[in-house]
Structures are given as structure tokens and as C-alpha cells.
Image (cartoon, helix red, strand yellow):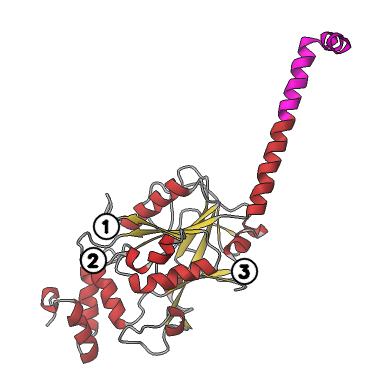
Amino acid sequence: MKNKKFIMKIKPKKYKKYCLLLIIYFLIEITYFIEKQKKKKGISVCLCVIGKNENIYAKEYVNHYKKLGYNHIFVYDNNDKNKSSERFLNALKEEVQEGFVSIIDFFGYRGKSNNSQYESYYDCYEKNNRKYDWLSFFDFDEFLELKPQNQTIQQFLSNERYKKCHNIKINWLHYESEKENLYYENKSLFDRFKKPMYDNSRNRLIKSTIRGKLTNYWRGWQNPHSSLNRYKACSSSGNFVDTVLPYIEPPDHKYAVLRHYFRKSFEEFCKKLKRGWPEHSDQFRAIVDLINENKNDEQKLNIIKKFFNITNYGFL
């Protein structure tokens, strides 16, 4: 009875006020609890990659990023539609079964704008940016190297220098062998190509690791190296850089590099050239140049003949 009298004494306005304060208190507690659980769980990071005719590199690539601590890899299989073509599932069956790799069917897809790479990046970000704190976009010939090397990708991204960054742009660093290899060797890329090409002009190009939960990140200019947005971009040192430009010059290799195995052996480069790659606008011209540059080298010419009908390219 006394409790009833006490409740009656509380004015309706004050009662509403107390309820509102109680609700706010519980919301703060719930938010705090969620943030605490996130910290326990750690940063979640995934990798998006598209490839074609790259089964021989897939295992090494996936294992590399697994060791760095990536939580998941989304592989966009851009091999040809015909049954005789390669399938990434054949090379990554174990990784798919254990749930570390997901393979997305992009068979024979060239994209609405003839840029399947850009469209795979767009698709991967739009479908997964709510599930992961960060998403990386690296190709099968790009291997992230962190400095110091004994850290995970989570430790790297947790650094205070990236606190205000939405996109971390990491520069390429091209690698080659001491002497040009003519043929593919069944060894790891790290063992085959140990010489960094610090003077390569293409080292200025970048690839991105992007925060999740950003609205309309990939937009406008259809370039896999950059996007027309207003989010803050940083170099690997955490310095703010131009958001739109697809390069950082001079290259910033202080805390991270993307080891880029672009050519590999001469045989592998011919195979890559026949397949084509997104950033090359004139595949035909590049093939003609390769033939003319090596027409006096019998060994290289035999490799070229293996991949191309040289009479179709004006070779004399």
C-alpha cells in the first residue's frame, strides 16, 4: 500500500523522464557490451581476388594470406566457361571445405564495361562490407609483406596511424630473378624471385585495403586501383594521400609493400599476355612488341610460337 502511495506521488512528467534515463542507460550498457565483445573477437579482415589460369599459384597465395591472419578469401573464378578450362575449386578444394575460401562464379564474364576485375571488386565489397572491418583487394601475383614481418594483418590495421584512414593504399614492389628465367619452375614465387626492382616505375601503383561499412565506395571511374569518392586515403605510413589517384609517388614502402610478380619467367609472361590482363588496353600491340623484341632470340621465339600464331601478328 505504501509503494502504491509512493508511485502516485511521482508526477507523470518525472515518470517519463526516469523511464527515458533508464532506456538511455541500458542503450549505453548494450553498446559498451557490443564494443567489448568486438575487441575480444578482434578485427575481421577478408581478401577479394579475381583470377584466370592461375591454379599453379593459388595454393601458395591462399596459404600466404592465411598465415597473415586473414579471416576469409573470396575468389572470383574468371576462367572460361568451357569444361576444359581451369577451375579454382580443383586447386583449392581443401580450403573451400574448411570454410576459409569461397569461390564465386565469374566464368567467362568480361563485365558490362569489359572490366571484370573492377566489377568483381564492386561485387565483393557490396556483399561483404557489413561482415568485415576491412577488405583487401589484391591479385594472384600480389603478395602483401608487412614490416616488421612477424605481425598479423589485424595487428597492422590496429595501429594508431590508420585510425582516421578509410583506405590504406599499398605500393607495389616488383620482383624478378637475378637472371631472367625462360621457363616455369615448380617452386614458390618467394624462392624463384628474390630481387626487388626498386627503380621500376610501376612501383608507384597501389592496391587498396578498405574499411567496411562505407557507403558507395566503388563508384564513378572504373579503375581497380582507385575510386571517385571522398573518403580519406592513406599510404602505408599513415600519411594522407590523394583519394582518387591510383598511385603514390614516390612509393611508400616503409610499413608494407605488395610484392608484385608481374612477369615471372618468359614462358609465364607469354601465357599471361595470351590470357590478357585488365590494365592493358592494347593486348594485340603488346604481343606484337614482344615478338619483335625477341625475333633474334631462338629460345624465346620458340616459347612465343608455343602460345601465339606469330603469322597473325605481322611477324616477319
Q: Is residue 46 left or right of residue 280?
A: right
Q: Amino acid at mark 2?
A: Ser
Where are the magenta residues, as a range?
Answer: 1-24
Q: Amino acid at mark 3?
A: Gln
Place of residue 122 in the rendered image (x, y in percent of width and height, measured from the top left): 39, 50
Q: Is residue 75 left or right of residue 9?
A: left
Q: CB of mark 2 within 8 Å of CB of mark 1?
A: yes
* Residue 256 in view (yes/no): yes
Distance of mark 2 from mark 3, alpha carbons? 38 Å
- The answer to which of marks 3 and 1 sits earlier in the sequence is 1
Label 2, secondary structure: give it: loop
Place of residue 193 in the rendered image (x, y in percent of width and height, measured from the top left): 43, 83
Place of residue 294 in the rendered image (x, y in percent of width and height, measured from the top left): 23, 85
Distance of mark 3 from mark 1, alpha carbons? 36 Å
Q: Is residue 131 left or right of residue 118?
A: right
Q: Residue furthest front?
A: 1
Which residue is the site of mark 3?
Answer: 151
Which residue is the site of mark 1?
Answer: 107
Which residue is the site of mark 2?
Answer: 85
